[in-house]
């Protein structure tokens, strides 16, 4: 049925630019290579989980080095994942343990609230220890290469975007239903076997739920590309835990400067953090960068974001330039955000992308 509604989800399979920038993702979709998290599960973690945080992080560094070697061997067909035994303690087990420890003084994102979420405290995002989801379904509205995408919408978000189009989910961390990693793993397995191209972790934002998502992947036995669909305000520690588990980072690069980010999303130090995380993600896996063009933010945000992408990640990175802004939530309280995008603003955004020489733009 999704082929009828989204024929470009089929034609994208022959799109050379999409295939070039997402070559490993397509290989996992087509069953030619294993998902990254499955490789992570084959790397032994040589440590006792009762030791200090510092010792666990050192073991994590060693595990990541082993992961990189094994990952390269598997990609070159020097090693077959089917021939590798699952170790008694894996790098992914270690990541789950570290995520649970972070939860006791939460710094999954750069707000670094430091609250102990395991004793009922919550930080700015309002998300508790147990994850809650608003919905999960096969999404046919994502980028063509992702469709059909098994998408899981977590309640709560690390941002307070004043125009949020999902505000009923993102600003309601106590809404939805509680979900366990075990249930998520089973749902993912069923949907992948039924033809989903990937599992797509979103919200709100997936970041406050990192512990749940890593544990769900650890319990998942099917090879499915994992897509981290986020505002990219993760802490450095969260980025380290994500490394080696995600096949595609589907990023949302919203603003070209900290002033606009503070005004529109109530978040500090946006640009440096989100730029750092884009560099780390680009070095770790494959990337699709989304940029929603906002009314009256073409020069200050769209231009700065697109030029940064070309300068730092190159011209072939896949960028989805989006024109579907509509004023939602508190947008009408802001002079510049209280209307839809004008067609000449989006034309200007496309012109900036051309001038910057971005070559792989979805629009
Ligand atoms: S994930 Fe939530 S509680 Fe944790 S640091 Fe970020 S906003 Fe604070």
Image (tube, helix red, strand yellow):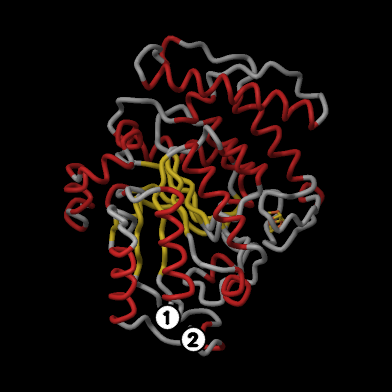
Indicate the quadrant where residue 265 lies: bottom right
Q: Is residue 10 left or right of residue 44?
A: left
Numbered tag placed on residue 336 in the rendering: 2
> Residue drawn 52% across and 41% down?
184
Residue 139 position in % (x across, y down): 35, 54
Q: Is residue 67 left or right of residue 148?
A: right
Q: Is residue 66 above or below residue 328?
A: above
> Residue drawn 56% across and 19% down?
66
Give the quarter the ligand 1 occupies.
bottom right
Q: Is residue 357 above or below residue 192?
A: below
Q: Is residue 354 above or below residue 246?
A: below
Q: Is residue 124 above or below residue 76?
A: below
**Residue position for label 1:** 295
Indicate the quadrant where residue 169 lies: bottom right
User: What element does badge 1 sit on?
Assistant: loop
Q: Is residue 274 left or right of residue 296?
A: right
C-beta proximity under 8 Å, tags 2 and 1: yes
Q: Would you call the spot at circle 2 few (<14 residues within 10 Å), some (14-19), or many (20 or more)?
A: few
Residue 179 position in % (x across, y down): 58, 47
Q: Nearer the viewer, residue 294 or 208?
A: 294
Residue 48 position in % (x across, y down): 76, 19
Disc 2 residue lies near ligand 1 with CB under 8 A: no
Q: Nearer the viewer, residue 183 or 345?
A: 345
> Residue drawn 46% across and 63% down?
305
User: What element does badge 2 sit on?
Assistant: loop
């Amino acid at each position: 049925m999704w082929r009828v509604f989204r024929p470009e989800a089929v034609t994208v399979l022959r799109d050379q630019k999409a295939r070039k920038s997402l070559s490993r993702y397509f290989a996992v979709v087509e069953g030619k290579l294993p998902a990254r998290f499955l490789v992570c599960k084959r790397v032994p973690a040589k440590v006792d989980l009762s030791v200090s945080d510092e010792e666990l992080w050192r073991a994590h560094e060693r595990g990541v080095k082993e992961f990189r070697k094994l990952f390269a061997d598997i990609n070159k067909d020097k090693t077959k994942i089917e021939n590798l035994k699952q170790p008694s303690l894996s790098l992914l087990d270690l990541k789950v343990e570290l995520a649970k420890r972070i939860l006791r003084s939460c710094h999954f994102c750069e707000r670094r609230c430091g609250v102990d979420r395991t004793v009922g405290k919550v930080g700015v995002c309002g998300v508790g220890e147990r994850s809650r989801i608003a919905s999960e379904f096969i999404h046919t509205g994502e980028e063509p290469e992702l469709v059909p995408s098994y998408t899981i919408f977590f309640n709560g978000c690390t941002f307070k975007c004043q125009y949020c189009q999902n505000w009923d989910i993102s600003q309601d961390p106590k809404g939805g239903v509680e979900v366990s990693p075990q249930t998520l793993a089973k749902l993912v397995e069923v949907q992948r076997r039924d033809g989903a191209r990937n599992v797509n972790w979103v919200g709100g934002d997936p970041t406050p739920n990192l512990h749940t998502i890593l544990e769900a992947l650890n319990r998942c036995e099917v090879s499915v590309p994992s897509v981290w669909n986020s505002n990219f305000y993760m802490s450095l520690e969260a980025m380290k835990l994500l490394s080696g588990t995600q096949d595609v980072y589907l990023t949302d690069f919203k603003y070209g400067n900290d002033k606009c980010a503070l005004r529109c999303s109530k978040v500090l130090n946006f640009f440096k953090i989100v730029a750092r995380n884009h560099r780390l993600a680009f070095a770790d896996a494959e990337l699709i960068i989304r940029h929603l063009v906002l009314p009256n933010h073409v020069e200050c945000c769209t231009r700065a974001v697109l030029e940064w992408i070309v300068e730092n990640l190159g011209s072939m990175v896949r960028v989805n330039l989006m024109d579907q802004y509509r004023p939602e939530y508190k947008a009408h309280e802001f002079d510049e955000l209280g209307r839809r995008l004008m067609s000449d603003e989006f034309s200007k955004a496309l012109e900036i992308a051309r001038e910057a020489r971005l070559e792989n733009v979805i629009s």
